[in-house]
Amino acid sequence: MNLSLYFITVLIWGTTWIAIKWQVGVVAPPVSIAFRFWLAALVMFVLMRLLRRSVKAPREAWPLLAGQGVALFCVNFLCFYYAEQIVPSGLVAVVFSTAPLLNAINGRIFMGRPLQPSAIVGAVLGLVGILCLFAPQMVGHTGDRAMWLGLAITLAGTMSFSAGNLFSSRMQAMGLHPTVTNSWAMLIGATLLTLGSLAAGFSFQPEMTARYFGSLAYLAVPGSVIGFTTYLTLVGRIGPDRAAYCTVLFPFVALAVSTVFEGYRWSAPAVVGLLLVVVGNLVAFNIARHLPFRRGRGRSVRV
């Protein structure tokens, strides 16, 4: 079950990059993000109604819901949309791939969770792999001040992503399902983005093209409703540090798509990076411990 959730998340989030790319340009990023989460929240509440599930949240959960809405469905996306206007998307992926380490460290500091050596080692291997993949881009921009500003914005977005993970994990420990918390948190994030866009004087006129509306629908339903539900369910099942390893792997899905549609060419460092990420996954999930040729004292455990 965990591996299914993991690969669904990687597949969906690894393909949302091109939809985001199609949205950048005519419409202000906060407006496009607000459209995305208004639509996603509407779909979530309708699904909850059809499934006859209660959407009520206890009073003590509302500060956490607000925190998740601000961190995960507002600040996180604002940072990444604006960062990609300054630096190459590959460099953004490098910084975002530190999410497993941030989740592990923040989980230890704020939730008292022990640091799992396998998760830390796996995340480091994955980060090194991403660095190998994007090393040529980094070398070409080391003297660019705008690049470092973009990387700082990306780091802030990654920290917000990590904070949102921890808020969700805390609420799941309270017995709240991610479908409930995501519904309210997306609504909170969309409301804040709308108010901020109105205050900034941004136009709410969407780009009247099939590409814009198609990408909006994909980002709202598969990218948000399905992607965040599977990912945050995984956070509750295996912990934020191991679940966030998705962020290390999904850039490779994006590159596979780029290979088909944009003619991306794989280099020797990129191949080495891919191998490191695969090894990092094996380490982070302790998959080797559950292989058939390993003997154990009890039944095998699903990862």
Image (cartoon, rainbow, N blue to C red):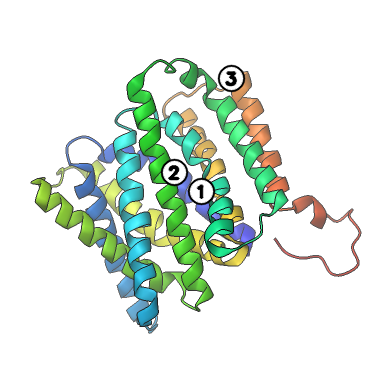
Q: Quadrant of residue 294?
A: bottom right
Whole-percent x, y for residue 107 in the image: 56, 58
| Badge number at residue 11 | 1
Q: Please say if 113 is above or below 285.
A: below
Visible residue check, residue 204 = no
- Looking at the picture, which amino acid does disc 1 mark? Leu
Q: Residue beneath label 3, please? A: 267
Q: Which mark is residue 15?
A: 2
Q: Where is residue 76 shown, x and y percent of the image?
A: 36, 49
Q: Nearer the viewer, residue 279 or 165?
A: 165
Tell me the crowding category of disc 1: few under 14, some 14 to 19, or many 20 or more residues within 10 angstroms, Cα based: some
Secondary structure type for disc 2 = helix
Distance between the Cα atoms at labels 2 and 1?
Answer: 6 Å
Q: Callout 3: few (<14), some (14-19), or many (20+) C-alpha neighbours within 10 Å?
A: few
Q: Residue at x 8, y 46 (%)?
A: 201
Mark 3 or 2 closer to N-term?
2
Q: Which mark is residue 241?
A: none
Image coordinates of residue 127 in percent, x first then y, are: 59, 36
Query: Which residue type does callout 3 highlight?
Result: Ser
Mark 3 lies on a secondary structure that is loop
Residue 162 % position (x, y): 47, 52
Horizontal side of 3 relative to 206 (left or right) equals: right
Instruction: Tell me, yes or no, whether the two marked residues, 1 and 3, touch with CB atoms within 8 Å.
Output: no
Q: Earlier in the sequence, mark 1 or mark 3?
A: 1
Quarter of the image for the C terminus: give it.
Answer: bottom right
From what the image shows, is residue 109 above or below residue 98? below
At mark 1, the secondary structure is helix
